[in-house]
Amino acid sequence: MKSITICGSMKFAEKMKQIAWRLEVEKGFNVLQCIYNEQNEPITDEAQKRLVAAHYRKIDICDAIYIVDIDGYIGTSVTDEILYAKENGKELIFHSRQS
């Protein structure tokens, strides 16, 4: 079973949840997802640093990252995650769908 970390803009949060479901059910992947702030709590700088560190740790322990690039959109954070994953020998899988 391949472990993957989903990387994508939070503007695609709902889509990423659906994608994670499909990847586990249809592909048998073990999906490590980002954390969704569904309750819209304020995020302090310190909390943001912890969230980023946790996400990069997920990349460290996975086999691949799954990049959600709907309509070709990849933001700065995801670009940095892609570079980090490449530098660490992770497979890159692109979702590349239209909205």
Image (tube, rainbow, N blue to C red):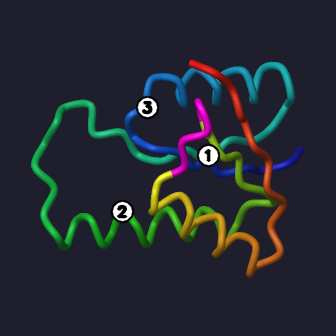
Q: In front: 30, or 81?
A: 81
Residue 48 shown left or right of residue 67 in the figure: left
Q: Which residue is mark 2?
A: 51
Q: How many marks?
A: 3
Query: Dot 1: what SS?
Result: strand
> Distance from label 3 to label 1 (Cα)?
10 Å
Residue at image position (56%, 18%) is 99
Stretch of the chain drawn in magenta: 70-74
Q: Quarter of the image containing the N terminus?
A: top right
Left or right: 16 in relation to 60: left
Q: Is residue 64 magenta?
A: no
Residue 83 lies, in percent from the top left, at 65, 73
**Lower position in the chain sequence, tag 3 or tag 1:** 1
Disc 1 marks which residue?
Answer: 6
Label 3: which residue? 13
Q: Position of residue 14 (x, y in %)?
A: 45, 23
Question: Badge 3: how crowded within 10 Å, few (<14), some, or many (20+)?
Answer: some
Q: Give the alpha-carbon distance from disc 1 to disc 2, as whole Å.
A: 14 Å
Q: Secondary structure at mark 3?
A: helix
Q: Residues within 10 Å of mark 1 (few under 14, many from 20)?
A: many
Left/right placement of residue 8 relative to residue 68 reads left
- SS at mark 2 in the image: helix
- Whether residue 96 sits left or right of residue 74 in the image: it is right
In the image, what residue type sits under mark 1? Ile
- Residue 64 appears in which quarter of the rendering? bottom right
Place of residue 65 in the rendered image (x, y in percent of width and height, measured from the top left): 71, 54
Residue that appears at 57% across and 49% down: 7
Residue in the picture at 17% in, 70% down: 45
Identify residue type, mark 3.
Ala
